[in-house]
Image: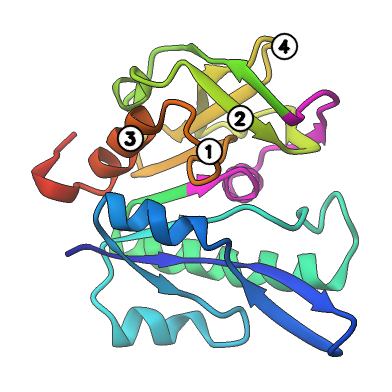
Amino acid sequence: MKNILVTQRLILHDAYHEIRDTLDVSFANLFSLLPALPILASSHIDPQVYFREHVLDGILLTGGNDLGVVNDCPLSHKRDAFERKIVELALVRKLPVLGICRGMQLIAHYFQSTLCERPGHVRCNHTLSLADGRYSELLSEIHTVNSYHNYGIDQLGPSLRSIAYAPDHSPEAIEHESLPILGIAWHPERDELDREGNLTLLRKFFDIEGYTL
């Protein structure tokens, strides 16, 4: 079974005066359908520990929290630094990195993209238009996606390209020109929209059950 390192949302729980790493339980269902084993990464543990103590097959950067560049919040900055280190370690090991929503924004910003507000992208569904790219075929079974983000990509960095667009022409999926890095703006774990297409995307990207690119 593939081991996928999964990052988590950081929240301040006021009632208990606690900072918590959290992950929607819907990810458990998603991973059981792949199948793959999520290795949950705490932002308060040195990322190198996970790479040293586990045989990792890929990285999943999940949603939640704005990036610090658009929301000057200590928890956002904490998570940014943690996930950027994970990306650096994954690049050294040539592991596939998939970013979901915020994860796509983190990848974009890491590779010198800029972000902007995207009105009309919260709690809605929309169609997906594909463009040519190395990972375009992985998205071919996905036609309608959910949307829960306030921010999106404005200008892409020079090593990235968009391979899918929303109806307003904003990037919905991006890939690196040569590295095994993919970002998607929607949440495959949240509902049944094109569920089989999203499972195919994840299985092929992480080479699960014999899938290859």
How would you rate the neighbour count of disc 4 (Cα within 10 Å): few for under 14, some for 14-19, many for 20 or more?
few
Label 2 to label 1, Cα distance in Å?
A: 8 Å
Residue 163 lies, in percent from the top left, at 47, 21
Q: Which portion, as a residue range, is magenta?
A: 99-123
Quadrant of the snapshot with the N terminus: bottom left
Whether residue 162 is situated above or below residue 116 in the rendered picture: above
Q: Residue furthest left?
A: 210
Residue matched to label 1: 191
Residue matched to label 2: 146
Amino acid carrying label 1: it is Asp
Q: Residue at x 33, y 35 (%)?
A: 201
Residue 166: which quarter of the image?
top right
Specify whether residue 121 is painted magenta.
yes
Callout 2–callout 1 Cβ contact below 8 Å: yes
Amino acid carrying label 3: it is Leu
Q: Residue at x 78, y 65 (%)?
A: 76
Callout 4–callout 1 Cβ contact below 8 Å: no
Label 3 to label 1, Cα distance in Å?
A: 15 Å
Please identify, in this view, whether the residue under mark 3 or under mark 1 is nearer the observer. 1
Residue matched to label 4: 168
Label 2 to label 4, Cα distance in Å?
A: 14 Å
Residue matched to label 3: 201
Q: Earlier in the sequence, mark 3 or mark 4?
A: 4
Give 36 or 163, whichever is nearer the viewer.
36
| Residue 82 falls left or right of residue 189 | right
Label 3 to label 4, Cα distance in Å?
A: 23 Å
Q: Residue at x 73, y 73 (%)?
A: 78
Please identify, in this view, whether the residue under mark 2 or under mark 4 is nearer the observer. 2
Residue 170: which quarter of the image?
top right
At numbered mark 4, what does the secondary structure look like: helix, strand or loop?
loop
Q: Residue at x 32, y 25 (%)?
A: 134
